[in-house]
Image (cartoon, rainbow, N blue to C red):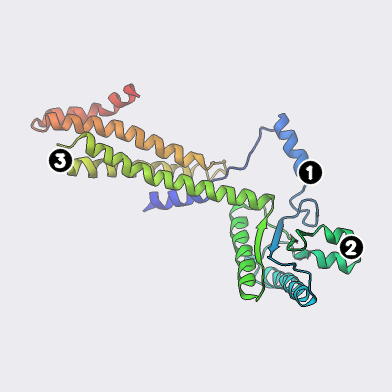
Amino acid sequence: PLGLNSLKHLLHDTDSTYHPLPGTLSGQAQDAFAKRYNESDWNDPIHPPMVMILQANESLLDPEPRLNETKAFVDGLESLLNETCWKTPWDKRCSTEDEFDVRVLSYFSWEAIELHTVAKTMAAHNNTVLFLEIQYMMSSNISHTRERTDQLLDILWDYTASTSVNFTAHHTGIKWFQRDLSNDTKTDLRRMDLFILPLALLLLGIVLPRANPLFVWIFPLVSMISTVCCWSTILRFTVLRWNWQVTQLTPSIMMSLTVGMGLDYNLFLLSRYVEDETNGNRLAVMIRQGGQVVFMSG
């Protein structure tokens, strides 16, 4: 149980954010970008945290009833986000800074201050697409950020689903693109890892059809799972405790090495077991020296 729980935490806390070496050109470039687009600069219109896209088959600004409906949706969204993100308990807010609030910049907010040209840039395709810039603060803590971004998305989609509107809503933004890419990468790697182990056991069954099924299936399965649990526990209580970076590829590479070396080791043991199963002394020698043989062959 400890190993499986450690594997779960390890997969959850992986981070593929690029961390260049300090003093290198890459490090200087990243420092310059962070200085220009500070994460705490929530009111930067050039680099908004989130862009929400409203899309419909007809103009969202014409005729007047549809315009009023769209405006009511946008105004209600800003009120909802401020209420949800600031009037809830501290640990469930979308930010940790009480002096900031959530703003939704849209066609209507620019029109309200008579910046008509800027307002037109918030609409596209004959006003069938509207862009909403959602400005907010987000904690820099990775685990809290993931929880709060998921919470923010739930708020947006629940509000959209509960409001009678004639358009669909989507979201984008640099951090959200990174988040979706990271989640998709994790999903693909997890599927690959879950596919490798059954395939490896199937290959063992094909290679050793005359061996005892108990040893062909149970022994390799226990061996590989034990190895995975072992390195998951070690990584969790050493690397993650010291705040070292563990990329999303690390668990997948470790899984591939586990299966690859496990196959070699188990093939060696099982093939020798078929030949020496009548001689107990030979089995004991085989088990003691099996690791050395696999290590040298690798």
Mark 2 Cα shell of 10 Å, populated few (<14), some (14-19), many (≥20): few
- Rounded to the nearest angstrom, the CA distance separating label 2 from label 1 is 31 Å
> Which residue carries the number 3 mark?
212
The single residue placed furthest to the left in the displayed view is 278
Disc 2 designates what residue?
116
Label 2 with label 1: CB-CB less than 8 Å = no
Q: Position of residue 108 (x, y in %)?
A: 82, 68
Q: Is residue 76 left or right of residue 293?
A: right
Identify which residue is drawn at 75% across, 39% down: 31
What residue is rendered at 82% in x and 57% in y? 121
- Near-viewer residue (239 or 154): 154
Residue shown at 84% from the left, 61% from the top? 119
Closest to the camera, between mark 3 and mark 1, is: 3
Which of the marked residues, 2 or 3, is nearer the chain's N terminus?
A: 2
Q: Amino acid at mark 3?
A: Asn
Picture layout, residue 211 above or below residue 181: above
Foreground disc of the pair 2, 1:
2
Question: Which structural element holds mark 3?
Answer: loop
x, y percentage for residue 102?
A: 75, 65
Residue 178 in the image: above or below residue 71: above
